[in-house]
Amino acid sequence: MTNKPQRNGDTWGDNYSSPLIKEFSDAITQREQDQTDYKMQLAAKIFKAMKSHGLTQNQFAELMGKPISLISRWMSGTHNFTVDTLVDIQRVLSISLLNVETINSYAQVNFKLNILSTIPGWTPLELEQYINDIGGLAVSEKTIEYVIKG
Amino acid sequence: MASLYSVMVETPSGVTTKFDQFLEKYRDKYPAQLMDIVRRLISLGNKTGCTENFFKLDEGLDPDDLVCALYDVPEFAMRLYCIRLSDQIVILGDGGPKTTRTWQEDRNLEREVHSMMDVSKIIRTKLKNGDLNMSADGLHLEGDLWITRPPIQQKTNKKNDDDKQATA
């Protein structure tokens, strides 16, 4: 805690810091704080989404089919949500609360495909036409060279 | 992000704050509830800000007094009364376990709510007449934060004064 502006040069209380707050703060583990932060941020996100839809807590309760007292608890940051509840909230408010999409396990390869014609006299346009006619890139390496650059 | 203030008080045992008094009173009997409250206050300050969903609004008797209470956990009603000036500034007060249907039925809670109503009235008056302002980023109170103070000549006898100051 830091103290706030003086008046008339009076410094009463300016050096005050709270040993009790420090004692409590020091006793909180990072894991506990992370859990609380997540619940609070979840509640804040739901509340913000509800507001952005122009809904009151009563209207949101009706849409969810839940009592208003439960909605208030959801918003308070003290509630341990079930996945089923979060899925329902996502649907009603069109927000993402659970990101379950997995990252593609295949290494993503970014490459540029350069196709060079080895057929003498073909223009790029003729080559493109030829590739389209045969249905893509299933072309013999003898006729087309391709280079993959990482 | 938000700033959480409390009200400093001069007591016979020295300077403290309303929030410290709250922690001191209940630390032995309700340590888990207090830890939960401190964790949530840290989240409010560092992560979410003090949006209205985190508070039981309209706890005071005046419709515009901004006196509210941090939401209780469902299992145990431990009231911490506050003044929510904005989404970014809240003044913490005192409170206690709520065992009656309304705070008016509990002398301790009634005293704390009225105390916050008194502080709120002074703070809102100062904000209205310009003695107190919110900083440009909305995170700080700037200006005259004295709520009551003894005359300068009586300062050597502060222990008997009811001297209060809002502080960060």
Image (spheres, coloured by chain):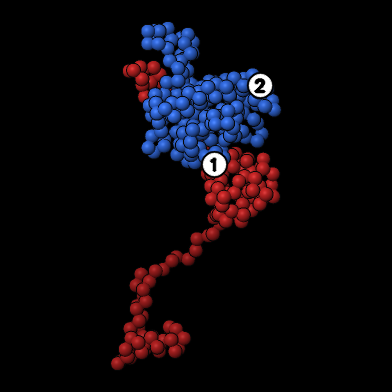
Chain colours: A red, B blue
Instruction: Identify the residue shown where x is 46% and y is 33%.
Output: B89
Q: Which residue is mark 2?
A: B106
The correct choice, above or below, for A138 with respect to B129 in the image is: below
Q: B116 and B130: which one is in front?
A: B130
Instruction: Identify the residue shown where x is 45% and y is 33%.
Output: B3
The disc placed on residue B155 is none
Element class at badge 2: loop
Instruction: Identify the residue shown where x is 46% and y is 37%.
Output: B88
Spatial CA distance of label 1 from label 2 is 29 Å
**Residue B70's spot in the image, x, y percent?**
57, 32
Instruction: Tell me the kind of residue under disc 2.
Output: Asp
| Residue A68 left/right relative to A143 | right
Q: B42 and A117: which one is in front?
A: B42
Which chain does tag 1 point to?
A
Q: Are marks 1 and 2 on the same chain?
A: no
Q: Nearer the viewer, mark 1 or mark 2?
A: 2
Question: Label 2 neighbourhood size at 10 Å, few (<14), some (14-19), many (20+)?
Answer: some
Element class at badge 1: helix
| Residue A29 left/right relative to B29 | left
**Residue B92's spot in the image, x, y percent?**
51, 27
The correct choice, above or below, for B105 with respect to A50 in the image is: above
| Residue A64 left/right relative to B123 | right
Q: Which residue is mark 1?
A: A40
Which chain does tag 2 point to?
B
Q: Are marks 1 and 2 in contact (CB under 8 Å)?
A: no
The correct choice, above or below, for B110 with respect to B140 in the image is: above
Instruction: Identify the residue shown where x is 50% and y is 37%.
Output: B50
Question: Label 1 neighbourhood size at 10 Å, few (<14), some (14-19), many (20+)?
Answer: many
Q: Quadrant of the N terminus of chain A?
A: top left
**Residue B68's spot in the image, x, y percent?**
57, 31
Q: A136 and A67: which one is in front?
A: A67
